Structures are given as structure tokens and as C-alpha cells.
Amino acid sequence: MSTERSGEDRPVTDLRRTLFWGLSSVGLSVLTILAIVFLIHGRVSIGDVLRVGLGTVLTAACMVALSWMVDGLRLFVLARAMGGRLSYLESVRISVAGAFMAGVTPSYTGGEPLKVYYLHRNGMSIGQATASVTLVAMLHTTTRFLLWLLMPLVAFALGLSYQFTAPVKVTLGFGLLVYLLFMALLAASTIWPEAVVKFVVRLFSTALVKRYVSSDVLPKVENTVRRVAQDFREAMMTFRTRGSRVALALVLSLIYWVVLISVPVFLLRKMDSDISAFQVFSLSMTVYLVMAYVPTPGASGGAEAGTAVFFSPFLPARVLGTFVVVWRAVTYYFTLLIGGTLVLLDTLTHSYKRVKLQSP
């Protein structure tokens, strides 16, 4: 596999663009929350949010931090399986930084590339890093969907009360379709990496791309994509001989979602809501499933609106508004704060080292 480290001298991210997307996502989130408050006729106030209590908010934030630790351990296990030598704390830092970048880019597209960059900078080849991050994403998506899909079946088996609202039914059909397409594409890229190369070549051969990209770029792109695709396939095949590591990562993925979904369950308990924990778990998984397909940075707007739509049949207006604000604050804004700080410090430190090395 390729072990060159050509990407190491590049800056981690464009701070101006990241700041723009970050402010845009937060702004859209705040506007959506204000719209929700308006639609429920202002039945939530700052006092309602403050009555939740600092202790409750800090406990929920600690639960979110615990999910980061589980996510970092999952990345650590898979990166080690591929021969990576990064520490557990470095894996947690990469996971939190990736969560931040995913939260400030459309459709969460920035998280995986940043993780690949950091893993490559820690000595892994692009193919190894890509395979590790891709498997993390695959397990993340698969366990989220399976947990969500199993909720009605578990409710039926245990004789629990479970209500299928119209939005949940629509999400079920759409989510199943998108998930099957995702798995088909992933399987194709693993079994036929050359198909990815052909697709890129055809893309760069279109008139639109040729208008902006010079002809001498195509061979370089083709060679790079072919090398990375082959490295990725070899890396994925390597995972077949490390089934125990993949199984452990699968268990960690399940634990991650259980910890993260425990946050809304805990918050609604503290708000004296009588909705069952099982129903909260199921509705929260539905919200996260919808968020995965919202094209805005960090699913801003869609996350808040989805929470309001899915939970409105079960919560009074005042509790609903307060819940949307607090849940989004401890999961999304808290992640932006901590992850953004890590990315900023790393970018400044790395830039300083590059300047120092280039100075006479």
C-alpha cells in the first residue's frame, strides 16, 4: 500500500470557509428554533430553559462527552487493526474534530475527510486511513438504522405501547430506500474499485469539467484515484482477517448510539415528561435518521424542525420548545465549541510549525 505523506504539509482546513459554514449553521439553527417558538405561540421562555437546571445540562453534556470517548475507541480499534500507531487520546481528538467538521459542512461531508487527513498525518497510508474511516461510517450508519428499525419490533414483542405517527411512517420508507442504496454503493466500491476509477475518468471527460480543468490534470487524478481505490480495497480485505476487531467496533457503535440517545431520555425525565423512555428512544433515533439526509451544515434547521414534528404529538408546547433548545445545545452547540477549539488549535500549531520549518 502507498505510504507517502504528501498531504501532511497542507493546512488542516480553510478557517474562513469553516467559520462561514459554522456561523451559517448556527444562524439557521437559531432561526428555526425561533420559528418553532413562534408556531407554538411563544409558550417557551428563557425562564423555562433556565429551570432545566445547570446540573441537568452538565450531566447531559458529560453523556455527550462519553459518546465521544466511545466513538474515539471505535476509531482506535479499527485504526490499530490497519496498523495505525496512534494513541487512544489522539483517536478521541480526531473523532471530536471530525464531529465538528461534519457539523459545519453540508450533509456532514467534512467529517470523514478530516479524519482521513489526521490518520494519514499519524503515519497511516491514505488507503488505510480511508478504509478505517469508511468502516467507522458504515458501522455508524448501519447500527443507527438497525436500532431504529428494531424499535417497533421490540415494542410488539414486549407488548409495549408504540404509536406510528405519519412522519415516522414516511421516514421508515425513505430511510430504508436510502440505506439500501448506500450499502449497494459501498459494496460496489469494495468489490470493483476499478469502477470508481472509470466513473472519475468519465466525470473529468465531460465538457463542463474540461472547461475548468486542464487536460494534463486528468492522468494525475486517474492515477491518484486508482491508487487510493486499490489501497482501500486491500485495506477492506485486510479487515476480513480481523473479524474480532470489526465485531468489537460493531458493539462500540451500538454502545455509542445507546449513550447518545440516553441524552434526550434523561432530559425529558428531568422536565417531568410522562412520555415513555422507549418512545423517546425511538423518536430520537428517527430524528437522527432524518438529520443524516438534511443537506444543510450540521443538519441545522432540519434537526430542530424534525424534533418538533416528531415529538409534538407527545409533548405539551412549553416542554417541546424547551426540549428542542436544550437538546440541540448539549449535543450540537457543545460539539461545535469543543471540536472547533481542537481544530483551531491544531491548525494554528501546524501552521506555526510549517512557517518555522520554512524560515531560514
Image: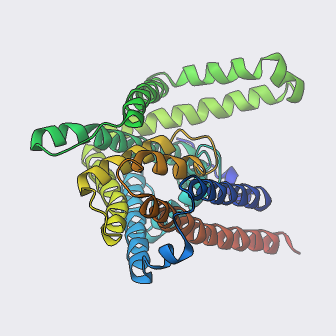
Give the vertical position of 229 relative to 297 (above or below): above
- Quarter of the image with the C terminus in it: bottom right
Instruction: List x then y, in percent, for residue 176.
Output: 38, 28
- Tell me which residue sits at (48%, 21%) in the image: 192
The number of discs equals: 0
Q: Nearer the viewer, residue 56 or 32?
A: 32
Q: Image check: 326 left or right of 277?
A: right
Instruction: List x then y, in percent, for residue 59.
Output: 38, 76
Instruction: List x then y, in percent, for residue 127.
Output: 53, 42
Q: Image check: 259 left or right of 298?
A: left
Instruction: List x then y, in percent, for residue 50.
Output: 49, 79
User: Does any portion of residue 120 appear in the rendered image?
Assistant: no
Q: Image check: 10 left or right of 313?
A: right
Q: Tell me how the rendering is colored.
A: rainbow
User: Does any portion of residue 141 appear in the rendered image?
Assistant: yes
Q: Nearer the viewer, residue 261 or 326?
A: 326
Q: Could you say which quadrant of the image residue 239 lies in?
A: top left
Q: Image check: 193 left or right of 271?
A: right
- Tell me which residue sits at (48%, 65%) in the image: 322
Q: Nearer the viewer, residue 334 or 320?
A: 320
Residue lying furthest front: 41
- Tell me which residue sits at (75%, 32%) in the image: 220
Q: Nearer the viewer, residue 264 or 233?
A: 264
